[in-house]
Amino acid sequence: MTFNPLKEKGMPLEKQLRNWHQIVAKPYKKQKVDCYTRTRQILMNGIEVEGWGFKHQFNRFMSEVDSDDKATISRLGRIENQQQMTCNWLCPADQSVLETTLGYEQVAVDLTAWLAQNEPDEYVKETFNFGLLEDFDHLYRYSQFAYMTEGIEPSDIVQGQTDVIVGRPTQHHHNCNGLRLRNFYDKNTASPQTKVNILTVLSGEQQTHNFYAEHGFMYADHVLRETYAEIKDVEEEHVTMYESLIDPSESMFEKALLHEFTEVCNYYTCYEDETDEEIKKYWEIFLDMEIGHLKLVADMFKKYEKRDPEEIIGSEIVIPCRFTSQKAYVQKVLEKEANKRLAPDGKYYKNYDEIPEDWASYDVQERLSEISAPSENCIKLIEIYHDRDIVEASENLKNKEVTILEKGLQTKAVAHNTVMPDDLQDMIDKHEQREKQKEEII
Ligand SMILES: [Fe+2]
Ligand SMILES: [Fe+2]
Ligand SMILES: [Fe+2]
Ligand SMILES: [Fe+2]
């Protein structure tokens, strides 16, 4: 495959303004939509939010840009804003906040797993694997509430493509923010693939944070509200972690190029992969628009930096994510790395048994969970409703749940309401006994 977007014509900016009827598209049907159409829709909303926000930052901070170019950036920002509405509002009104939440965490798991396997930089790959296991556990925690609150089976949303089972427990995702900061890539040697991968996952995580911030209060259940607060706080750490991988010495023009290139690459992939013919039309139009954006910022890059844009983005497109089931890869990382933690120095990772007593994240964890950890309470609650937690995975993985929990749990800064491995085993046994009793009665 060779596709050099800088050589394509793209839609001229003058033709990109759309009317309200075109902006507000017909939503998909939640009962019929393919889960990966929904993940594309969720991800592209996040990418557009980032594209829109970046243009405002650009115009706020850039004094050396002439007024014509500032006007172009601001017109581009309006188009990103319109695209964002179209993407986000493909979501139907009857898709509940919890259903959409499961979609967001499915994006995080399957996107990050794909990126990790297609990431040329080993350090960045390790960071993707680290973040992956946290979103994997979020999916499990929210799935308990989806069942208790709305009777939703996780498979109604993830359609059996993503496993739902305990990961690295959410209460252990809280860290000293300083420890979340990673080493950044070198802008002169990092590949366009690495740059696009990071910007893609960062946009997704940032929007996940925003979605929980704006919707977590929409449920009356206090434990659920607290769980949204807890997981939103982890998404804040994910934004901190992924953005810190970016070389801060990239110029704003370089960043502008990378933003448009990331949009081009993502829409290109969405267009190639989409199975819903109606939604595919939007990916096609938006790809054409983004090629137009890329050409405009490439011209600015040449004008102000006197450099060739291909030095930054290369001469062909990269594929940031093909949404497909990642169960085998995720299981492998889960079994190997549930006990990983942020190292106290050097911006690397360590297994939990190598973490020192004075690890800075302990203070954060002890403070946040001093009353209780909401993400543990949700398992306590589901025990009342259902005898045990809701799990969707192969029998092979299900049988390892207690072992995974044992591996992921810390011995220090553990919330007093934690479901310990023995508790989980009791729940599983109790559930089996009740199922047998049921069969006898029936
Ligand atoms: Fe856009
Ligand atoms: Fe998450
Ligand atoms: Fe996340
Ligand atoms: Fe754009």
Image (cartoon, rainbow, N blue to C red):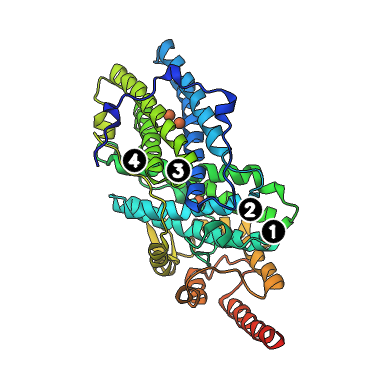
Is 103 on the left or on the right of 292, as rendered? right
Instruction: Say whether disc 3 or disc 1 marks the residue closer to the N-terminus.
Output: 1
Instruction: Say whether disc 4 or disc 3 marks the residue closer to the N-terminus.
Output: 4
Mark 3 burial class by Cα count in 10 Å: few <14, some 14-19, many 20+: many
Mark 1 burial class by Cα count in 10 Å: few <14, some 14-19, many 20+: few
Residue at screen point 58% across, 59% down: 156
* Horizontal and vertical percent position of residue 238: 49, 48
Query: Which residue is identified by label 1?
Result: 150
Q: Amino acid at mark 4?
A: Lys
Instruction: Say whether disc 2 or disc 4 marks the residue closer to the N-terminus.
Output: 2
Q: Are marks 2 and 1 in contact (CB under 8 Å)?
A: yes
Is 262 on the left or on the right of 135, as rendered? left
The residues tagged by marks 2 and 3 sit, at their Cα atoms, a distance apart of: 22 Å
* Horizontal and vertical percent position of residue 437: 68, 86
Mark 2 burial class by Cα count in 10 Å: few <14, some 14-19, many 20+: many
Q: Quadrant of the C terminus?
A: bottom right
Query: Which residue is identified by label 3?
Result: 202
The residues tagged by marks 4 and 3 sit, at their Cα atoms, a distance apart of: 11 Å
Q: Amino acid at mark 3?
A: Leu
The residues tagged by marks 1 and 4 sit, at their Cα atoms, a distance apart of: 39 Å
Q: Are marks 1 and 4 in contact (CB under 8 Å)?
A: no
